[in-house]
Image (cartoon, grey):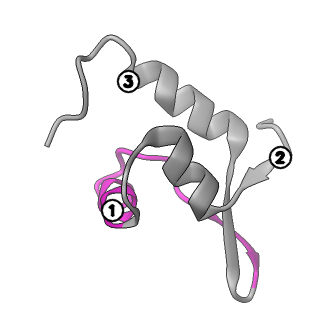
């Protein structure tokens, strides 16, 4: 089970160094962890899922376009 700590979009952007548009584009291509609905107008990402995604990106020499 992932950590119960959620990150909101501004935190996710800082963690991964990507823009909002790029994050959602990668989600649409199933290349980034999907957000989870927290309330009617609020989404978040599990911190553990973001950390796992970051660890898969290390050593690749940057983002593929």
Q: Are marks 1 and 3 in contact (CB under 8 Å)?
A: no
Residue pictured at 38% horizontal, 24% vertical: 57
**Nearest-to-viewer mark from 2 and 1:** 2
Indicate the position of residue 47 as horizontal and vertical percent values.
70, 41
Q: Mark on residue 37?
A: none
Residue 61, relative to residue 39: is it above or below? above
Q: Which residue is mark 1?
A: 28
Q: Give the secondary structure at mark 1.
A: helix
Point out the residue furthest to the right here.
4
- How many residues crowd around disc 2 within 10 Å: few (fewer than 14), some, or many (20 or more)? few
Callout 2 touching callout 1 (CB < 8 Å): no
* Residue 26 highlighted magenta (yes or no): yes
* Residue at mark 3: 57
Left or right of 34: which side holds 5? right
In the rendered view, would you say 17 is above or below 9? above
- Label 2 or label 3, whichever comes before in sequence order: 2
Q: Between 31 and 41, which is closer to the camera in this rendering?
A: 41
Q: Please tell me whether mark 2 sits on a helix, a strand or a loop.
A: loop
Q: In which quadrant will I find the N terminus?
A: top right
Is residue 4 covered in magenta? Answer: no
Q: Position of residue 51 (x, y in %)?
A: 60, 30
* Residue found 53% across the figure and 47% down from its top: 14
Magenta range is 21-39
Cα–Cα gap, marks 2 and 3: 21 Å
Residue at image point 28% right, 55% down? 29
Mark 2 and mark 1: span between their CA atoms? 23 Å
Query: Badge 1 local density, few (<14 within 10 Å), some, or many (20+)?
Result: few
Residue to which mark 2 is pinned: 5
In this view, the residue in front, 2 or 16, is 16
Sequence-wise, which precedes: disc 2 or disc 1? Answer: 2
* The C terminus lies in quadrant: top left
């Amino acid at each position: 089970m992932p950590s119960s700590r959620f990150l909101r979009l501004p935190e996710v952007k800082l963690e991964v160094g990507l823009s909002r548009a790029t994050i959602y584009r990668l989600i649409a291509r199933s290349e980034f962890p999907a957000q989870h609905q927290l309330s009617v107008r609020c989404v978040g990402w599990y911190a553990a899922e973001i950390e796992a995604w970051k660890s898969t990106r290390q050593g690749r020499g940057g983002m593929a376009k």
